[in-house]
Amino acid sequence: MTADKHLQSWQERFELAEAMQPLLGKLYRNQGVEVQIYGRPLLNASTIDITKAHRLVAKYEGEKLRLRESFPFVEALTRLDIKHCRVDIGKLAVNYWRNHSDASEIDAYMAEQLAPAMGKSLEPRDVVLYGFGRIGRLLARLMIERTGVSNTLRLRAIVVRGGKDGDLEKRASLLRRDSIHGPFNGSIEVDNENNAIIANGTYIQVIYANSPDEVDYTQYGIDNALVVDNTGIWKDEAGLGLHLKSKGAAKVLLTAPASGDIKNIVYGVNDSDILAEDTIMSAASCTTNAITPVLKAINDKFGIKNGHVETVHSYTNDQNLIDNFHKAERRGRSAPLNMVITSTGAAKAVAKALPELKGKLTGNAIRVPTPNVSMAIMNLNLANETDRDEMNEYLRWTALYSDLQNQVDYTESTEIVSSDLVGSRFAGIVDSQATIVDGDRAVLYVWYDNEFGYSNQVIGVMQKMLGVTGLVLP
């Protein structure tokens, strides 16, 4: 009987997750509503992913959230005239069931909680990816997974060098298959006659060019577009400004730290610095995005006198596969075979997003033989004393309820390792089990998917630059 009971319970959860999937899809496709459970996105999620997201709630709240308790909230969403927002039904459901014994008031409760998103509408904008490497392809995946009439970021083209025979097929293949992030979730076709890739119905023009200023985007029906430069070749205003000489290009975003007076934006921290008249921006680096939200949270609560950030970073395409010449010190040695001490400007770059920490942080980096997911170890001297429990509880609250909830994640697992975090959409994940606090000194360990987590941060900056940022509720 016990075995039958567990099987019956699993069957019930599985069927509810299956019933939830089409509702979640329609909410996004038709209304631009992305549903989450405690920060875990349910858009395009499998039934297993939906079930696991519900189980996660117990780690935060000490009590389960059952699918039969959350399902009525998804149904209620379909009855509301809300658009272009991100809704955490996990938090809404937990709060509701703490104060109610039946479902009779769910519709009224949801209408009250989601009132700011009623009737909200955003116009879609064109996006061009200039460069199609690691970050470019992940940005493409993130935009394509949101394909639908309500999608506000429309990937219209990619610009690459080349044009040799077979180039288009190879570009499509690299989008279709990824050794780290797995297969593309959908279908990809190649239109050789028109130099295009069709991914899940998204028509992506492939344009071959050697310079940012030699493309006429308007001939492809692209206008007033945001060009996202993933090449890292041009980092100053003069170089990135070349993009703006191309017809149809309106704004430029660099997916790397910029030089000069260009604003370096860490989404969630200083994106309020983005003004409508800004035409050239930077999304900073993956490490700066990982550490700045946590540093801001710590500084706001305890104050930071000074500190050192050591980055344990997965190797990147900049390093050599085997020993060979490299202009940088040590980076010429084989990346898969060595730990390589190198420099990083991420600690100093924090000050561009968080000026109150200017001159307070030093940093260094160790490249290690893993292909993705890195860690920042932050050794901080605090202005106010605290203890480990208070520090962890505050960071847990930050991850769940603060304005940084979409940037900072928190784990209490004693078994988690780097590969478990491939595909994390957060800028950084606090490993609470490794936290060390001794009075006014704290050592924090923050994991981050230096590819996918960073790409999600870039998407946030893109939305803000184009004025298509949706509300996050509650």
Image: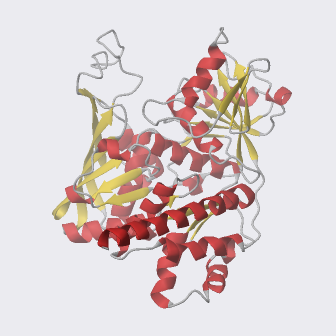
Front in this rendered view, residue 257 or 116: 116
* Colour basis: secondary structure
Q: Give the vertical position of 398 relative to 142 (above or below).
A: below
Q: Give the vertical position of 249 relative to 299 (above or below).
A: above
Quadrant assignment, res 219: top right
Front in this rendered view, residue 178 or 290: 178
Q: On the rendered structure, is 279 left or right of 233? A: right
User: In x, y percent, where is residue 462?
Assistant: 63, 46
User: In x, y percent, where is residue 119?
Assistant: 77, 70
Does the rendering let one see residue 403?
no
User: In x, y percent, where is residue 434?
Assistant: 21, 55
Q: Give the vertical position of 319 relative to 438 (above or below).
A: above
Q: On the rendered structure, is 344 left or right of 269? A: left
Q: Residue at x 80, y 33 (%)?
A: 248
Q: Residue at x 46, y 37 (%)?
A: 181
Front in this rendered view, residue 101 or 95: 101
Front in this rendered view, residue 361 or 222: 222
Q: Residue at x 55, y 44 (%)?
A: 458
User: In x, y percent, where is residue 211?
Assistant: 67, 18
